[in-house]
Image (spheres, rainbow, N blue to C red):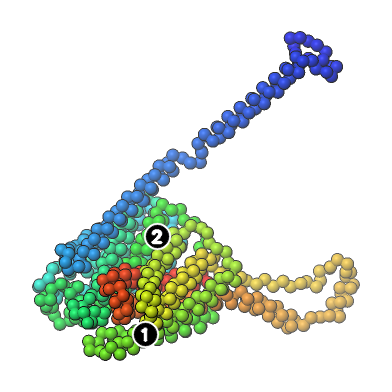
Amino acid sequence: MCLNTGHPCDCLTDGNPCEPCRMTAKDRETEEAHLSNNINVESQAGRTCEPEPNIPSSVVAREKGQNWGRMLSGIICLNVLILGCTLASGSAHNDVNIKTTDLQMYLIVLLLLTSLWMIYYIIFTSRKENAVFYQDAHAGPVWLRGGLVLFGLLSIIMDIFKIASYVGYLHCDSAVKVAFPVVQLVFTLVQTYFLWVHAKDCVQLQRNITRCGLMLTLSTNLVVWMTEVTEESLHQTTAPDYPENITKHSKRSEYIVKASYGDSECKCSHTSCSIFKEAYYYLYPINIEYSLFASAMAYVMWKNVGRVADEHGHHKIKFSLRDIFLGPVTGVLLVVAGLATFIVYEIEMQKASSDDDDNEKAIMMHFVTNIIIVSLMSISTVIGCAIYKADHREHVYDKNPTRSLDVGLLVGASLGQFIISYYTIVAMVATEAKGYLNRLNLALAILIVIQLGLQNFFIIEGLHREPFHEVHTVTVVSNPYVLQPGKELSNLEESDTEIKPDPASTEHGLHGHAAEHRHKLSWKRRVLKEVCAFLLLGNVILWIMPAFGARPQFDHDTETEFYNFSMWAAVVNVGLPFGIFYRMHSVASLFEVFLTS
């Protein structure tokens, strides 16, 4: 067949196409290739420009609404915090015309608004069936909520003591100081119930309102925390008027009167005021930790608003001390020894007429006790990290707001103790660490830096490991009556009659193998649990001592003379509250690592 229809010829039959036929065939191939390229380009463009059918416009609108709600709630939190920080810092100085009652009135407004929102949330979620369709299984474990309830009850007792003490000054002082602990008591009751019941919620309705309410709750707790930390810090570090005793600890009782009432001429109308003041003073650290616990739980709830939580991946873990002995026993001994030395140290530091030699002996005892505690904790942490290297559990990579917050708080809070330690190291090295107290102080600061780094690694690694699972051994028993290839039935029967194994020995061998297998699986768990229990109790005593008044940073005067009092007081007052919170947060994180181990 000739391709050139205008000029027919017999070129194709001869096998030698003429020039017109060759040009026609070439043009047809070029045109087909061009058409196929155009079709491919159009199909690809259609695929790229075509909208995804699986993403409806309602989802896009919902994402925009979520971003708007997050931004609005963040703005609310930021403004509440900045205003609260301004009032708290201003009321702490006598030369600033901001009174304590001004700060307390602001706190009363915040506490009332937050309590009203929490009551509204409780009623709304109980009446709306689909308001909370999902729950985050990792958020608000029962031990954390139990600790919150315990701290809440002790905070309520502190508020009762405050009310009983402030009532004696109503005749000569502002009634706001009585109204504030009353409102705070109601707020603590409402918030404790709210977080106990709803800590796991992933709210699906009224998301923006819920986000704003949770950020209001978070910022209110942080303002309360800042207020109490400021008062507690000034309580411990008020510089005396006479320079020869500038670093001593003798102004505590005087500052209680000054900080609480501000008027030395106002006398209490009943005789129990001093008892109540001393009682609620020692409950201040509990209320500080309660505010931080509540802030952390409110933040996790805020992150979970609108979240579709995973329905798998959470394992029910039970608390058990089976086969755990060395860690808890040595930890308890450490706590008892630490408490004994801490009490002796505090009694010696509060004596009005004590010799310098007695003070130095008490400070030396405190330094030595802390060095021993921190050294033992560092050694046990190294053992735990070595176990992690030999451990083959999988790492957890899924997104979890609770775990992310735990890691962030752990690293962030440890910066406070790092700052104090490095300032101490610089001061000791610059002064050549003369004297045994300076050398002990330098050794303690270096050990604390090492222990913080090791403990952070240990806890973070433990939080990112899958929990241990019980492995049940499977016993495989061979059946002698199954024919093997190449064996005849007669040979099998003959061998069976000749060789009969002892049932007792067979059973012993099987059970011995199973027991050995279980031992190989459980030794890592036992060592990790021992390490976690010891570190947990070590952090407890390291929390108790600074939280309830130990201030070797001011009782030992090298840093005060090197940096001057105002600078060193600012460093300690900023870093120490974070260091105290770090120890309590480490206790909570180590307990979780203990459970998953």
Q: Tag on residue 337?
A: none
- The residue under label 2 is which amino acid type? Val
Choose between 429 and 490: the one closer to the eye: 429
Q: How many marks?
A: 2
Residue found 68% across the figure and 23% down from its top: 30
Using the image, determine if residue 523 lies above or below residue 484. below
As drawn, the residue found furthest toward the top would be: 7
Q: Tag on residue 300?
A: 2
Quadrant of the image containing the N terminus: top right
Dot 2 or dot 1: first in sequence order is: 2
Using the image, determine if residue 274 lies above or below residue 55. below
Element type at marker 1? loop
Residue found 51% across the figure and 67% down from its top: 461
Horizontal placement of 171 versus 490: left or right?
A: left
- Quarter of the image where one finds residue 488: bottom right
Q: Is residue 127 visible?
A: no
- Quarter of the image where one finds residue 58: top left
Element type at marker 2? helix
Classed neighbour count for the residue bearing mark 1: other residues with Cα under 10 Å, few (<14), some (14–19), many (≥20): few
Q: Residue 184 at what x, y percent from top left?
A: 24, 67
- The residue under label 1 is which amino acid type? Gly
- Quarter of the image where one finds residue 570: bottom left
Q: Tag on residue 435?
A: 1
